[in-house]
Image (tube, rainbow, N blue to C red):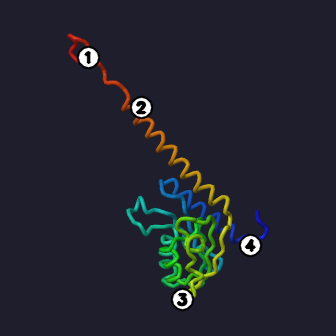
Amino acid sequence: MNRDLPATDETYMGLALQQARAAMAQGEVPVGAVVVCDGQVVAVGHNCPVGGHDPSAHAEMQALRAAAQALGNYRLPECELYVTLEPCVMCAGAIMHARIRRVVYGAMDPKTGACGSVVDLFAEPRLNHHAEVIGGVMRDECVGILQTFFSERRAAAKARRLSAAAEATEEPPTQTPGSTN
């Protein structure tokens, strides 16, 4: 355990990783999120845009929706969000609108990260809400689950391609003269 971090950050990120594993079990990109208010977990969520046919069904969005319902308010100013992957622009916008106090994420997202990897919306002075952002909590575990997922997907795609190529090169059965196939 990293002694430089509060135990609660690692505890809650561990719960977010459980949600990421649930997403992976459903064939979704393994990202999980947990909303905590006053030291209590009030909501969880995991990626489900593929199965739900919903481009907004990111882990953060699922957790924010559930937290708003549980607390009876779309404003969540006393809450913290733990997520295994750096939020994207869509999720960062929802986090700002919800007035989340603190965002803690594990893995950086160099392609769509909106907490500093690509853009840093939480540092943009023209925007009206600025959550505290902490990155890299349980980074190795968060990166590891993503790497495993994409490695397995690439291996499965390669196996499908090889199988299709093998089937395409198989010669059709030949008919001998006089046979009645």
Cα separation, mark 3 vs mark 1, equals: 76 Å
Residue density around tag 2, few if under 14, some if 14–19, many if 20 or more, within 10 Å: few
Q: Decide: marks 2, 4 in contact (CB < 8 A)?
A: no
Q: Decide: marks 2, 3 in contact (CB < 8 A)?
A: no
- Label placed on residue 166: 2
As helix, strand or loop, the secondary structure at mark 2 comes to helix
- In the displayed structure, 39 sits above or below 170; it is below
Indicate the quadrant containing the N terminus: top left, top right, bottom left or bottom right: bottom right
Can you identify the residue that label 4 sits on?
Answer: 6
Q: Is residue 66 visible?
A: no
Q: Is residue 178 left or right of residue 6?
A: left
Cα separation, mark 2 vs mark 3, equals: 58 Å
Identify which amino acid the numbered label 3 is placed on. Arg
Residue density around tag 3, few if under 14, some if 14–19, many if 20 or more, within 10 Å: few
Identify which amino acid the numbered label 2 is placed on. Ala
- Label placed on residue 126: 3
- Label placed on residue 175: 1
Identify which amino acid the numbered label 1 is placed on. Gln
Q: Position of residue 158 (x, y in %)?
A: 48, 42
Which tag is nearer the camera, tag 2 or tag 4? 2
* Chain-order first, disc 2 or disc 4: 4
* Chain-order first, disc 4 or disc 1: 4
